[in-house]
């Protein structure tokens, strides 16, 4: 298959310390030190299909998400740059702006797994299988999130609006947001999969959307906080951290995961400093081109008898560009 992009499905994001950073920014009058206004943004995702250079859907290779899956985990550091009341005029900041911190790089890892075991509600199974690519975040990019709920009086909805409510009793504000492209470089690749040398510039998370409540995917009760480590690319990595242990209860009622898994602490109402918690979660969707050297290249799916995937660029998912 000659492909233009990996198409990643809707997923969740986890702002670890996000509400605390916002509170610090407001409390300092916008003059707090960077370290007090930073938070970590974590996400994971699963390939749901492939697209051509024009952005159109391609037939999926046999076995995608039945006999194998391709997943990613990622973590970036961001800093709050603004908090203003733009929505309902009650004087309570409801629109927050932020920027990635290039001097505090995070990580991105992509896995090929012959066991289809990733679960959105548990956050498990996204960091196991053969590690085929990793990298770090770099440039400063800007984003925002606006709470659209009325805060005075407080209007909330169930956090989980996707299918059956797996978080009975967990409430959230409503809101929307976006983020500019986040480039990732310092790539290490598995040449058994990426048959062409990828460019140092690497990968870009592009057209990142955010929303509350979750409507097309289940919220996750766990995110992977650490990468597999140096020297792991090209090797098989066992699942760690997030486990299949979800219970039908608010986020605070979930089982505390073992490291490197992290349970979001979002309080009774996600998206509020009070009665919320220090963290914040939201649904997200993103696409991202990945650049390679200026010659044709391919990605092989080992052991599947599927041949190779030629890598190009387009609009949906985690796109792979060889330009």
Image (spheres, rainbow, N blue to C red):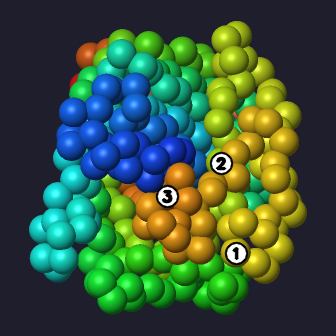
Considering depth in this image, is 272 or 308 the residue closer to the camera? Answer: 272
Count of labels in the image? 3
Q: CA distance from mark 1 to mark 3?
A: 14 Å
Residue 248, relative to residue 305: is it above or below? below
Residue at 27% of width from left, 17% of height from top? Answer: 294
Q: Is residue 316 left or right of residue 17?
A: left
Residue 174 visible to an observer of this rendering = yes
Residue at 27% of width from left, 77% of height from top? Answer: 148
Callout 1 environment at 10 Å: few (<14), some (14 to 19), or many (20+)?
some
Where, by quadrant of the figure, is residue 33 drawn?
Answer: top left
Question: Considering only order in the chain, which callout, 2 or 1, is on the residue closer to the N terminus?
Answer: 2
Q: CA distance from mark 2 to mark 3?
A: 12 Å
Question: Considering only order in the chain, which callout, 3 or 2, is on the residue closer to the N terminus?
Answer: 2
| Image mark for residue 250 | 1
Task: Look at discs 1 and 2 and give the one toward the viewer.
Answer: 1
Callout 2 environment at 10 Å: few (<14), some (14 to 19), or many (20+)?
many
Task: Find residue 133 and report its horizontal and vertical position in percent.
Answer: 57, 25
Which residue position holds label 2?
223
Q: CA distance from mark 1 to mark 2?
A: 16 Å
Task: Find residue 179 and report its horizontal and vertical position in percent.
Answer: 27, 49
Considering depth in this image, is 278 or 116 the residue closer to the camera? Answer: 278
Q: Is residue 290 left or right of residue 207?
A: right
């Amino acid at each position: 298959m000659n492909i233009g992009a990996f198409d990643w499905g809707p997923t969740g994001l986890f702002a670890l310390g996000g509400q605390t950073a916002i509170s610090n920014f407001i409390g300092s009058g916008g003059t707090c030190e960077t370290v007090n206004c930073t938070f970590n943004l974590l996400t994971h995702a699963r390939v749901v299909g492939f697209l051509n250079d024009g952005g159109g859907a391609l037939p999926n290779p046999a076995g995608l998400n039945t006999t194998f899956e391709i997943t990613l985990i990622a973590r970036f550091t961001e800093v709050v740059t603004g908090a203003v009341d733009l929505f309902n005029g009650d004087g309570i900041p409801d629109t927050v702006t932020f920027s990635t911190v290039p001097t505090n790089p995070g990580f991105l890892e992509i896995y090929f797994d012959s066991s289809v075991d990733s679960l959105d509600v548990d956050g498990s199974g996204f960091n196991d299988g053969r590690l085929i690519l990793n990298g770090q975040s770099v440039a400063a990019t800007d984003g925002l999130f606006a709470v659209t709920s009325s805060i005075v009086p407080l209007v909330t909805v169930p956090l989980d609006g996707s299918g059956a409510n797996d978080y009975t009793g967990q409430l959230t504000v409503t809101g929307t947001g976006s983020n500019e492209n986040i480039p990732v470089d310092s790539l290490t690749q598995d040449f058994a999969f990426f048959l062409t040398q990828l460019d140092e510039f690497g990968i870009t998370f592009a057209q990142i959307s955010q929303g509350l409540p979750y409507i097309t995917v289940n919220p996750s009760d766990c995110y992977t906080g650490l990468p597999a480590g140096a020297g792991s690319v090209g090797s098989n990595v066992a699942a760690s951290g997030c486990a299949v242990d979800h219970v039908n209860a608010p986020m605070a009622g979930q089982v505390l995961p073992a490291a490197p898994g992290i349970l979001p602490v979002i309080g009774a109402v996600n998206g509020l400093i009070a009665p919320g918690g220090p963290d914040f979660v939201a649904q997200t969707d993103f696409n991202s081109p990945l650049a390679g050297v200026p010659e044709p290249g391919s990605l092989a799916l080992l052991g599947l008898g599927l041949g190779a995937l030629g890598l190009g660029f387009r609009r949906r998912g985690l796109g792979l560009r060889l330009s």
